[in-house]
Image (spheres, helix red, strand yellow):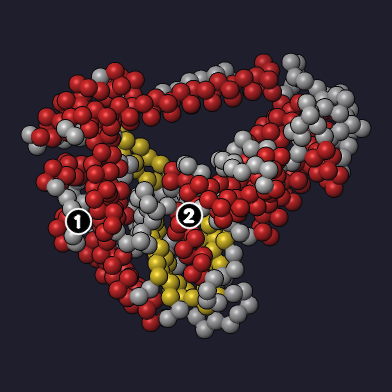
Amino acid sequence: MKLEIQIEKVIREEAEKLIERYHEYHNRVHINSKRNKNRLGDSAPSKKIHTPDYWRIDRKFNPFYVKSNYKSIARSIANKIERRTYIPNKPFMKEVDKPDGGIRRVSIYQIPDAAISKLFFNRLLAKNRHRFSSFSYAYRNDRNVHFAIQDISVDLKRNERTFLAEFDFSDFFGSISHDFLNKQFSENGFYISPEERFVIKSFLKGNKVGIPQGTSISLFLANLTCWKLDQSFEMEGVKFSRYADDTIAWSPEYTKICNTFRKINDFSKSAGVEINPKKSDGISLLTKDGHPAEIVAKTSLDFLGYTLSVDNVSIKEKSFKKIKKQISYILYRNLIQPLKQNSLAGQVIPANDKDKNFLSAICEIRRYMYGGLSNKQIKDYLSGRTKRIYFKGVMSFYPLVDDVEQLTQLDGWVLSVVHRALRLRCKLLATHGFSRSHSFPFNASRKVLLTRCAKYTISGKNLLEIPSFLLIHKALKKGLEESGIERVMNPESLNYDYA
C-alpha cells in the first residue's frame, strides 16, 4: 500500500479515536452535572466543559481540525518522509505525578506525528515480534500484564522457597544511551528498513540521550533496548518477567540469582540507565510464612497491581486501598454530601421504606465493581443459564486474583461501610427534622441489611442487592477456565494504572 494512503488511514483513525474520547468526556460531565443537580439542588456546581490546553497551541492537536484535513496533512508528511526531511513538531510536555512523589514528563505529540509514530511502531512490531523474549510482556499485541502475573504465580507455587532479584531503573526512558540503542538496530537480527531508521532518528532528534515517553515508537525502542538483558537472563537459565522496565527474576538456585544481578549491573552501565536503589529490593528469598530462612526473606512480592505469594495471587495493598477509596467516595457523594447543605430544597427525602439516594449509591457501586452486570446476570452465568457475559468492572482488571480470604474481607468491609454510611445519613436527616430511624434501610442492623437488601425488589428487580467481590471473582474464574485471559480481562487493561 502506498505510504500516503497508510498515513491517511492512521491519521483519520487517531483523530476519530480522540473525538470519540472527547464526546465520552462531554457525556460524563453532562451526566454528572445532572446527578449533582439532583443530589445538591441549587448548591450543585455549574457544568464546565474543558478542552486540553495544548489544543490552543496548534490546530494539529485538535482532532476535529485534523479529521477535516487529514488528506492534505497525510500528503505533506508522506512527501517529507520520502524526501527524508520529516521532523515531528515540538511536543507538548505534560508533567505527571509519580506514585513515589516524583514527576514524570510525558510528551504529547500533535495528532499527525502521533499517528506516524503508531504506524511505524506497528510495522516494526509486526516483523520483529518473534525476536523478543516470551518473558517480555509490555507493548505487544501477543502479551499483556495478566499473562505475566499468571506465569509468575504458576512458577512460584511450584516451590516453597524461591530466590528473587527485584530491581527498578531510574528514569528508564529518559536515560537510554543513543549509541547503545543504535547498535541494537543491526546487532540482534531485527528487521528495520532505512525508512524506519529515518523515522526513529527523527523522533530522537534534539535529545542526546533518552527516548520520548508518550509516543508509540518509543515502546518498540524500549523493548529493543532490553533485548540483550532478556537474552542474558535466558542464557543464565533463570525465570524472569519484564514489563517495560519493571523486572523480576527468580530461581531456586542462589548462585544463578547472584549472576543475574551482575548481568543487570552490566546492562545498566552499557545502556546508560541507572538502577533505582529506593525501588529495588535486591536479592531476597520468597518463602511460606513461618518457614526458616538463612537470608532476608519475604512471604510475598508486589508486581504491577498484584501481590504474589507461594499460595495466592492478591490485589496489591495500594490498589486495594484505591478500590476502597472509590467505594467510600460513591457512598459519601450519594448519601452524605447532599445532607451537608444548609437547605434540602429540591431533594427527595426518604419515605415509606424508600431512599432514592441509597438506590443510586448501590447501583453506582455495582457498576464500578461489575461494569453494568447485575447480581442475577452473574448468578445465571455461574449456574449455566447464561453462556457468556462481558466483564468490564474494576475486578476485570484483576482477573487472576485467587485470594478468597482477601475478597471475603473486602465483602465484609463493603457491608460495614454501607451500614456506617446509612447510620450517618440517618443522623444527618434527623438534624434537618426528618427522623427515619424507624424505617428501612436505616432500621436494619449490619447483619440484617445484607438479607433485606437482597430481597427488596424495585419494579420486580433486586436493584438494592449489595454487590460482592467474591461473586464476581467466581464468575471471572469460570470465564478464565472456559474462555481464557483475553476474553475475561478488561479491554482497557493495557491503559490501566497498575502502579
The residue that appears at 49% across and 60% down in the rendered structure is 150
Q: Nearer the viewer, residue 126 or 337?
A: 126
The tag on residue 231 is none
Distance (Cα) linking label 2 and label 1: 27 Å
As helix, strand or loop, the secondary structure at mark 2 comes to helix
Residue at left 28%, top 43%?
122
**On the rendered structure, is 304 left or right of 126?**
right
Disc on res. 190: 1
Where does the image place residue 91, in percent across and percent down from the top left? 27, 34
Q: Which of marks 2 and 1 is nearer the N terminus?
A: 2
Q: Which quadrant of the view contains residue 225?
A: bottom left
State how many labels appear: 2
Question: Is residue 353 something one can see in this rendering?
Answer: yes
Q: Are marks 2 and 1 in contact (CB under 8 Å)?
A: no
Q: Which residue is farthest right?
A: 438
Left or right of 448: which side holds 494?
left
Q: What element carries label 1?
A: loop
Q: Which amino acid does label 1 sit on?
A: Phe
Spot occupied by residue 395 in the image (x, y as percentages of width and height): 59, 47
Q: Is residue 210 visible?
A: no
Above or below: residue 264 compared with residue 131: below
Please say if 386 is above or below 45: below
Numbered label attached to residue 146? 2
Point 89% across, 28% down: residue: 435
Q: Which amino acid does label 2 sit on?
A: His
Identify the residue at image location x=61%, y=43%.
387
Q: In this view, does 45 lie to the left or right of 304?
A: right
Picture coordinates of residue 147, whole percent (x, y) = 45, 57
Location of residue 423 (image quadrant): top right
